[in-house]
């Protein structure tokens, strides 16, 4: 991997993590030492790559907010780091993470095997599937419903190559931002959109006058495996920052135990239990997680208090 000029500025930060093997999940291959070296791009700072699309990520009064933003701020505080956001388009974020120009990438980042080969992917903080955005007058929910219709999504999203291969699909339009897709759905220039479900749900709650909804697609895993699966929503770090990745993973275990992710999602109107129910198949096992690894589930008490 090529080393960028920014990589040369990285320094080593030592912090006490208190990672106890019996109670914390420190990620595949993580050590159980009480102190680890943590590299960050800038001294004392966690540089966070994000799109800035609410409700997952955004800024208010100079502070990172959102379902994912609130969690990474909590993690950074525990590690003794301040948070510095870096907002780019999606392709730019992926490249910046691979090159070590950000410390962590957040914001409804879906786990894929390809990404696991070039970045360190955390345990999930919640889960999501593929939903079809459309006007309320329709309830399209199959791949066959895409026949002869115009479907829009964001350039660089994992599903793009597979979407283009949907049998009979009319046209696939690629956009630089999720907002642009939403505008064209509302204006009637797109029949269907596929975006981050949390962003869409948040927008629908704020703008009922848009008269849109999103419907879960009926899975066809043999033909369309990418769009048929339920995804782990994770945080990604550069491969050169494994101690940092391990520290983040240990804090994610605490987040599930304390219901912090459920509370964060609920604060933005996304408290439905489905966000915290893992895929039936632990498809990370044997790829970047060992045999016996189980996707985390929120305690029942998270939904009864």
Image (cartoon, rainbow, N blue to C red):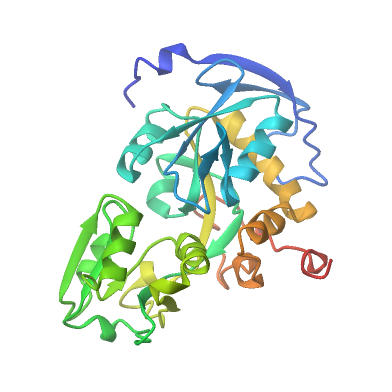
Q: Which residue is rendered at x = 66% and y = 71% of the image?
A: 273
Quarter of the image that includes the C terminus: bottom right
Q: How many marks can you see? A: 0
Residue 99: image x %, image y %?
37, 29
Residue 50: image x %, image y %?
45, 41
On the rendered structure, is 152 left or right of 291? left
Q: Is residue 247 above or below residue 304?
A: above
Where on the picture, by quarter, is residue 180? bottom left
On the rendered structure, is 134 left or right of 299? left
Q: Is residue 213 visible?
A: yes
Where on the picture, by quarter, is residue 169? bottom left
Residue 39: image x %, image y %?
57, 21
Residue situated furthest front in the rendering: 209
Q: Which residue is rendered at x = 73% and y = 63% of the image?
A: 298
Q: Which residue is rendered at x = 45% and y = 12% of the image?
A: 9
**Which is more toward the observer, 1 or 210?**
210
Q: Is residue 104 above or below residue 28?
A: above
Quarter of the image that includes the N terminus: top left
Q: Is residue 30 visible?
A: no
Q: Which residue is rendered at x = 61% and y = 29% of the image?
A: 243
């Amino acid at each position: 991997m090529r080393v960028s000029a920014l990589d040369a500025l990285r320094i080593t930060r030592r912090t006490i993590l208190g990672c106890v093997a019996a109670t914390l999940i420190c990620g595949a291959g993580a050590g159980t030492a009480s102190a680890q070296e943590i590299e960050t791009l800038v001294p004392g700072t966690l540089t966070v790559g994000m799109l800035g699309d609410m409700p997952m990520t955004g800024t208010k009064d100079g502070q990172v907010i959102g379902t994912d933003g609130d969690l990474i701020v909590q993690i950074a505080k525990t590690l003794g780091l301040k948070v510095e956001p870096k907002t780019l388009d999606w392709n730019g974020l992926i490249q910046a993470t691979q090159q070590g120009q950000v410390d962590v990438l957040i914001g409804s980042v879906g786990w894929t095997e390809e990404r696991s080969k070039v970045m360190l992917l955390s345990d999930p903080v919640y889960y999501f599937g593929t939903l079809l955005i459309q006007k309320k007058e329709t309830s399209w929910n199959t791949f066959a419903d895409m026949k002869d219709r115009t479907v829009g999504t964001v350039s660089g999203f994992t599903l793009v190559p597979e979407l283009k291969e949907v049998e009979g699909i009319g046209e696939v339009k690629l956009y630089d931002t999720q907002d642009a897709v939403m505008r064209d759905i509302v204006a009637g220039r797109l029949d269907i959109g596929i975006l981050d479900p949390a962003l869409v749900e948040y927008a629908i709650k704020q703008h009922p006058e848009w008269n849109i909804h999103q419907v879960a697609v009926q899975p066809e895993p043999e033909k369309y495996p990418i769009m048929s699966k339920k995804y782990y929503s994770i945080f990604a770090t550069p491969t050169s920052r494994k101690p940092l990745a391990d520290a983040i993973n240990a804090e994610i275990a605490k987040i599930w135990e304390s219901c912090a992710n459920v509370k964060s999602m609920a604060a933005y109107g996304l408290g439905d239990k489905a966000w915290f129910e893992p895929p039936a198949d632990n498809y990370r096992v044997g790829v970047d997680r060992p045999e016996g690894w189980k996707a985390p589930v929120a305690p029942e008490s998270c939904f009864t208090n």
